[in-house]
Protein backbone atom coordinates (compact mmCIF):
# COMPACT_ATOMS: atom_id res chain seq x y z
CA UNK A 1 0.00 0.00 0.00
CA UNK A 2 1.36 3.42 -1.02
CA UNK A 3 0.73 5.47 2.12
CA UNK A 4 1.64 8.80 0.51
CA UNK A 5 -0.82 8.29 -2.36
CA UNK A 6 -3.59 7.16 -0.02
CA UNK A 7 -3.06 10.06 2.39
CA UNK A 8 -3.39 12.60 -0.43
CA UNK A 9 -6.35 10.81 -2.02
CA UNK A 10 -8.17 10.94 1.31
CA UNK A 11 -7.96 14.75 1.30
CA UNK A 12 -8.92 15.43 -2.31
CA UNK A 13 -12.20 17.24 -2.80
CA UNK A 14 -11.93 17.77 -6.57
CA UNK A 15 -9.65 17.83 -9.58
CA UNK A 16 -6.82 20.42 -9.65
CA UNK A 17 -7.29 23.73 -11.43
CA UNK A 18 -4.46 25.05 -13.58
CA UNK A 19 -3.75 28.05 -15.79
CA UNK A 20 -0.80 28.94 -17.97
CA UNK A 21 0.53 32.38 -17.07
CA UNK A 22 2.56 34.42 -19.54
CA UNK A 23 4.05 37.56 -18.06
CA UNK A 24 5.75 40.06 -20.35
CA UNK A 25 8.01 42.41 -18.38
CA UNK A 26 7.12 44.45 -16.51
CA UNK A 27 4.49 42.25 -14.84
CA UNK A 28 3.35 41.53 -11.30
CA UNK A 29 0.70 39.08 -10.16
CA UNK A 30 -0.93 39.27 -6.73
CA UNK A 31 -2.62 35.96 -5.92
CA UNK A 32 -5.18 35.95 -3.08
CA UNK A 33 -5.45 33.06 -0.65
CA UNK A 34 -7.32 30.00 -1.89
CA UNK A 35 -8.63 26.80 -0.33
CA UNK A 36 -6.32 23.85 -0.75
CA UNK A 37 -2.69 23.94 -1.84
CA UNK A 38 -1.13 25.99 -4.63
CA UNK A 39 1.71 25.32 -7.01
CA UNK A 40 3.81 27.07 -9.66
CA UNK A 41 6.10 25.59 -12.28
CA UNK A 42 8.43 27.93 -14.17
CA UNK A 43 8.42 26.69 -17.76
CA UNK A 44 10.43 29.52 -19.30
CA UNK A 45 12.26 32.63 -18.07
CA UNK A 46 12.58 33.72 -14.46
CA UNK A 47 10.72 35.72 -11.84
CA UNK A 48 10.49 36.56 -8.15
CA UNK A 49 8.09 35.14 -5.58
CA UNK A 50 7.05 36.87 -2.36
CA UNK A 51 5.73 34.14 -0.05
CA UNK A 52 3.23 36.65 1.42
CA UNK A 53 2.07 40.15 0.61
CA UNK A 54 4.19 41.67 3.39
CA UNK A 55 7.32 39.59 2.88
CA UNK A 56 10.54 41.52 2.33
CA UNK A 57 12.68 38.59 1.10
CA UNK A 58 11.56 37.40 -2.31
CA UNK A 59 12.67 34.07 -3.76
CA UNK A 60 14.20 34.07 -7.23
CA UNK A 61 12.76 31.39 -9.52
CA UNK A 62 14.25 30.11 -12.77
CA UNK A 63 13.22 27.75 -15.55
CA UNK A 64 12.38 24.31 -14.17
CA UNK A 65 11.83 25.51 -10.60
CA UNK A 66 8.77 24.23 -8.74
CA UNK A 67 7.02 25.90 -5.81
CA UNK A 68 4.38 24.31 -3.58
CA UNK A 69 2.28 26.48 -1.23
CA UNK A 70 0.88 24.13 1.42
CA UNK A 71 -2.12 26.15 2.61
CA UNK A 72 -2.87 28.19 -0.50
CA UNK A 73 -1.72 31.38 1.24
CA UNK A 74 -1.78 34.64 -0.73
CA UNK A 75 1.51 35.53 -2.43
CA UNK A 76 3.05 37.59 -5.23
CA UNK A 77 4.88 36.72 -8.45
CA UNK A 78 6.67 39.41 -10.45
CA UNK A 79 9.38 39.92 -13.02
CA UNK A 80 11.27 42.21 -10.62
CA UNK A 81 11.00 43.04 -6.89
CA UNK A 82 10.16 46.65 -7.73
CA UNK A 83 7.24 45.84 -10.05
CA UNK A 84 3.81 46.64 -8.65
CA UNK A 85 1.67 43.49 -8.45
CA UNK A 86 -2.03 43.44 -9.28
CA UNK A 87 -4.84 40.92 -8.90
CA UNK A 88 -5.56 39.51 -12.40
CA UNK A 89 -8.60 40.89 -14.21
CA UNK A 90 -11.15 38.68 -16.06
CA UNK A 91 -10.26 40.18 -19.45
CA UNK A 92 -6.66 38.98 -19.04
CA UNK A 93 -7.74 35.34 -19.17
CA UNK A 94 -7.78 33.69 -22.58
CA UNK A 95 -9.20 30.26 -23.35
CA UNK A 96 -6.38 28.12 -24.72
CA UNK A 97 -6.58 24.32 -24.60
CA UNK A 98 -5.64 22.19 -22.78
CA UNK A 99 -5.54 24.74 -19.92
CA UNK A 100 -6.59 28.37 -19.66
CA UNK A 101 -4.18 31.20 -20.37
CA UNK A 102 -3.47 34.37 -18.42
CA UNK A 103 -1.56 37.09 -20.27
CA UNK A 104 -0.33 40.22 -18.53
CA UNK A 105 2.41 42.84 -18.48
CA UNK A 106 4.12 44.93 -21.12
CA UNK A 107 6.26 44.04 -24.13
CA UNK A 108 9.48 42.90 -22.46
CA UNK A 109 10.99 39.42 -21.97
CA UNK A 110 8.45 36.68 -21.28
CA UNK A 111 8.17 34.36 -18.30
CA UNK A 112 5.92 31.34 -18.74
CA UNK A 113 4.50 29.51 -15.73
CA UNK A 114 1.97 26.82 -14.97
CA UNK A 115 0.03 27.90 -11.90
CA UNK A 116 -2.69 26.00 -10.13
CA UNK A 117 -4.52 24.78 -7.10
CA UNK A 118 -5.03 21.33 -5.60
CA UNK A 119 -8.40 21.02 -3.90
CA UNK A 120 -7.59 19.46 -0.53
CA UNK A 121 -9.67 19.34 2.63
CA UNK A 122 -8.01 21.93 4.84
CA UNK A 123 -10.38 21.45 7.75
CA UNK A 124 -8.94 18.05 8.68
CA UNK A 125 -5.62 17.74 6.87
CA UNK A 126 -3.72 14.50 7.12
CA UNK A 127 -0.82 14.90 9.59
CA UNK A 128 1.61 14.27 6.72
CA UNK A 129 0.46 17.51 5.06
CA UNK A 130 0.54 19.45 8.34
CA UNK A 131 4.22 18.59 8.79
CA UNK A 132 5.22 20.05 5.42
CA UNK A 133 6.80 23.51 5.31
CA UNK A 134 4.38 26.31 4.42
CA UNK A 135 6.31 26.77 1.18
CA UNK A 136 8.45 24.21 -0.63
CA UNK A 137 10.87 25.51 -3.28
CA UNK A 138 12.49 22.84 -5.42
CA UNK A 139 15.11 24.51 -7.65
CA UNK A 140 15.94 22.94 -10.99
CA UNK A 141 19.36 21.38 -10.43
CA UNK A 142 20.97 19.04 -12.99
CA UNK A 143 20.75 15.43 -11.83
CA UNK A 144 18.54 16.19 -8.84
CA UNK A 145 14.91 14.99 -8.68
CA UNK A 146 15.04 13.51 -12.20
CA UNK A 147 11.41 12.29 -12.17
CA UNK A 148 10.12 15.70 -11.15
CA UNK A 149 12.26 17.35 -13.84
CA UNK A 150 10.91 14.89 -16.41
CA UNK A 151 7.30 15.66 -15.41
CA UNK A 152 7.96 19.40 -15.73
CA UNK A 153 9.53 18.88 -19.16
CA UNK A 154 6.55 16.81 -20.32
CA UNK A 155 4.14 19.47 -19.09
CA UNK A 156 6.03 22.15 -20.96
CA UNK A 157 5.99 20.11 -24.17
CA UNK A 158 2.27 19.38 -23.99
CA UNK A 159 1.44 23.03 -23.28
CA UNK A 160 3.72 24.37 -26.01
CA UNK A 161 2.46 21.95 -28.66
CA UNK A 162 -0.97 20.49 -27.78
CA UNK A 163 -1.81 17.34 -29.74
CA UNK A 164 -4.34 14.54 -29.71
CA UNK A 165 -4.71 13.42 -26.10
CA UNK A 166 -3.35 16.60 -24.51
CA UNK A 167 -6.66 17.27 -22.77
CA UNK A 168 -6.19 14.04 -20.85
CA UNK A 169 -2.42 14.11 -20.49
CA UNK A 170 -2.05 17.59 -18.97
CA UNK A 171 -4.51 17.11 -16.06
CA UNK A 172 -2.94 13.73 -15.31
CA UNK A 173 0.54 15.27 -15.25
CA UNK A 174 -0.64 18.12 -13.01
CA UNK A 175 -2.17 15.53 -10.68
CA UNK A 176 1.04 13.47 -10.65
CA UNK A 177 3.10 16.62 -10.06
CA UNK A 178 1.89 16.80 -6.45
CA UNK A 179 3.23 13.33 -5.71
CA UNK A 180 6.53 14.15 -7.43
CA UNK A 181 6.83 17.36 -5.38
CA UNK A 182 6.24 15.56 -2.07
CA UNK A 183 8.49 12.66 -3.04
CA UNK A 184 11.28 15.10 -3.88
CA UNK A 185 10.82 16.88 -0.55
CA UNK A 186 10.84 13.61 1.39
CA UNK A 187 13.96 12.43 -0.45
CA UNK A 188 15.69 15.71 0.41
CA UNK A 189 15.23 15.24 4.16
CA UNK A 190 18.35 14.11 6.05
CA UNK A 191 18.54 10.40 6.72
CA UNK A 192 19.55 11.28 10.29
CA UNK A 193 16.12 12.77 11.06
CA UNK A 194 14.50 10.48 13.62
CA UNK A 195 11.01 11.98 13.68
CA UNK A 196 8.35 13.17 11.28
CA UNK A 197 6.49 11.61 8.37
CA UNK A 198 9.47 11.82 6.02
CA UNK A 199 11.31 9.51 8.41
CA UNK A 200 8.24 7.31 9.05
CA UNK A 201 7.67 6.55 5.36
CA UNK A 202 11.28 5.38 5.01
CA UNK A 203 11.64 3.56 8.33
CA UNK A 204 11.88 -0.26 8.06
CA UNK A 205 9.81 -0.72 11.22
CA UNK A 206 7.15 2.01 11.05
CA UNK A 207 6.52 2.03 7.27
CA UNK A 208 5.19 -1.58 7.14
CA UNK A 209 2.80 -0.85 10.02
CA UNK A 210 1.48 2.27 8.29
CA UNK A 211 1.03 0.33 5.05
CA UNK A 212 -0.93 -2.37 6.87
CA UNK A 213 -3.26 0.18 8.49
CA UNK A 214 -3.88 1.89 5.17
CA UNK A 215 -4.41 -1.37 3.31
CA UNK A 216 -6.85 -2.78 5.85
CA UNK A 217 -8.40 -0.01 7.98
CA UNK A 218 -11.10 -2.42 9.22
CA UNK A 219 -8.50 -4.87 10.55
CA UNK A 220 -8.63 -5.79 14.23
CA UNK A 221 -5.37 -3.99 14.89
CA UNK A 222 -3.65 -3.98 18.25
CA UNK A 223 -0.33 -2.47 19.19
CA UNK A 224 1.07 -6.01 19.36
CA UNK A 225 -0.17 -7.05 15.90
CA UNK A 226 1.32 -3.89 14.39
CA UNK A 227 4.56 -4.41 16.31
CA UNK A 228 4.76 -7.91 14.83
CA UNK A 229 4.85 -6.28 11.38
CA UNK A 230 7.72 -4.07 12.45
CA UNK A 231 9.98 -6.67 13.98
CA UNK A 232 10.17 -4.69 17.23
CA UNK A 233 8.88 -5.35 20.71
CA UNK A 234 5.48 -3.88 21.58
CA UNK A 235 6.95 -1.11 23.75
CA UNK A 236 9.77 -0.22 21.32
CA UNK A 237 7.37 -0.09 18.38
CA UNK A 238 4.85 2.10 20.23
CA UNK A 239 7.59 4.58 21.19
CA UNK A 240 9.04 4.74 17.70
CA UNK A 241 5.67 5.02 15.95
CA UNK A 242 4.49 7.80 18.28
CA UNK A 243 7.72 9.76 17.88
CA UNK A 244 7.65 9.61 14.07
CA UNK A 245 3.94 9.82 13.27
CA UNK A 246 3.03 12.22 16.07
CA UNK A 247 0.39 10.07 17.77
CA UNK A 248 0.13 6.54 19.24
CA UNK A 249 -0.53 3.61 16.89
CA UNK A 250 -4.17 3.01 17.82
CA UNK A 251 -4.96 6.73 17.70
CA UNK A 252 -3.73 6.72 14.11
CA UNK A 253 -5.78 3.59 13.37
CA UNK A 254 -8.90 5.46 14.53
CA UNK A 255 -7.93 8.53 12.52
CA UNK A 256 -7.45 6.50 9.34
CA UNK A 257 -10.69 4.57 9.82
CA UNK A 258 -12.70 7.78 10.08
CA UNK A 259 -10.75 9.37 7.21
CA UNK A 260 -11.55 6.32 5.08
CA UNK A 261 -15.22 6.58 6.06
CA UNK A 262 -15.37 10.28 5.16
CA UNK A 263 -13.89 9.53 1.74
CA UNK A 264 -16.42 6.74 1.14
CA UNK A 265 -19.27 9.05 2.13
CA UNK A 266 -18.05 11.73 -0.29
CA UNK A 267 -17.32 9.46 -3.23
CA UNK A 268 -19.60 6.41 -2.96
CA UNK A 269 -23.35 5.80 -2.62
CA UNK A 270 -22.93 3.05 -0.05
CA UNK A 271 -25.39 2.73 2.86
CA UNK A 272 -24.01 4.13 6.11
CA UNK A 273 -23.99 0.63 7.61
CA UNK A 274 -21.68 -0.61 4.84
CA UNK A 275 -19.40 2.40 5.31
CA UNK A 276 -19.26 1.61 9.03
CA UNK A 277 -18.28 -1.99 8.32
CA UNK A 278 -15.57 -1.02 5.85
CA UNK A 279 -14.17 1.44 8.38
CA UNK A 280 -13.90 -1.28 11.03
CA UNK A 281 -16.92 -0.52 13.23
CA UNK A 282 -19.08 -3.35 14.53
CA UNK A 283 -22.28 -1.29 14.54
CA UNK A 284 -23.71 1.66 12.67
CA UNK A 285 -24.51 3.33 16.00
CA UNK A 286 -20.90 3.12 17.24
CA UNK A 287 -19.65 4.42 13.90
CA UNK A 288 -22.09 7.34 13.78
CA UNK A 289 -21.17 8.36 17.32
CA UNK A 290 -17.42 8.29 16.56
CA UNK A 291 -17.88 10.05 13.22
CA UNK A 292 -19.98 12.86 14.70
CA UNK A 293 -17.45 13.36 17.49
CA UNK A 294 -14.65 13.78 14.92
CA UNK A 295 -16.45 15.61 12.08
CA UNK A 296 -19.15 17.50 13.96
CA UNK A 297 -22.05 16.02 11.98
CA UNK A 298 -23.72 12.65 11.45
CA UNK A 299 -22.52 10.58 8.46
CA UNK A 300 -25.63 11.24 6.36
CA UNK A 301 -25.49 14.97 6.99
CA UNK A 302 -21.77 15.03 6.21
CA UNK A 303 -22.43 13.27 2.89
CA UNK A 304 -25.15 15.75 1.89
CA UNK A 305 -22.98 18.79 2.71
CA UNK A 306 -19.92 17.31 0.96
CA UNK A 307 -21.92 16.55 -2.19
CA UNK A 308 -23.51 20.00 -2.21
CA UNK A 309 -20.12 21.71 -1.89
CA UNK A 310 -18.51 19.66 -4.69
Image (tube, helix red, strand yellow):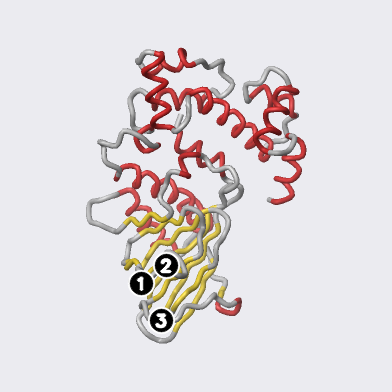
- Residue under numbered circle 2: 113
The disc at residue 232 is: none
Q: Are marks 2 and 1 in contact (CB under 8 Å)?
A: yes
Quadrant in the rendering for residue 138: bottom left
Q: Which residue is mark 1?
A: 47
**Label 2 Cα neighbours within 10 Å, binned few <14 / some 14-19 / many ≥20:** many
| SS for dot 1 | strand
Q: Residue at x 35, y 47 (%)?
A: 185
- In the picture, measured across the screen, residue 289 lies left or right of residue 195, that is right
Label 3 sits on residue? 83
Label 1 Cα neighbours within 10 Å, binned few <14 / some 14-19 / many ≥20: many
For label 2, the SS is strand
| Dot placed on the residue nearer the N-terminal end, 2 or 1 | 1
Residue count near mark 3 (Cα–Cα under 10 Å), binned few <14, some 14–19, many ≥20: some
Q: Position of residue 10 (x, y in %)?
A: 56, 39
Whichever of callouts 1 and 3 sits on the residue coming sooner in the sequence is 1
Q: In the rendering, at what x and y percent does residue 110 appear?
A: 38, 77
Distance from label 1 to label 3 (Cα)?
11 Å
Amino acid sequence: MDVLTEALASMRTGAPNSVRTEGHAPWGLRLPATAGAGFHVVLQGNCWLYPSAGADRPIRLGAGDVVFVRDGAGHILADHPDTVAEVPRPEQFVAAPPVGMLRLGGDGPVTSLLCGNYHLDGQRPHPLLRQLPELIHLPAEPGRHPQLAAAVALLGTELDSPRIGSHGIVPALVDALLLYILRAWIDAQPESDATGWAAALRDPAVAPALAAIHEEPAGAWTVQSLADRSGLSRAAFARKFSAMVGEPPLAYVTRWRLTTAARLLREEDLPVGVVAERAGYSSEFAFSKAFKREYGSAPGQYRRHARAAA
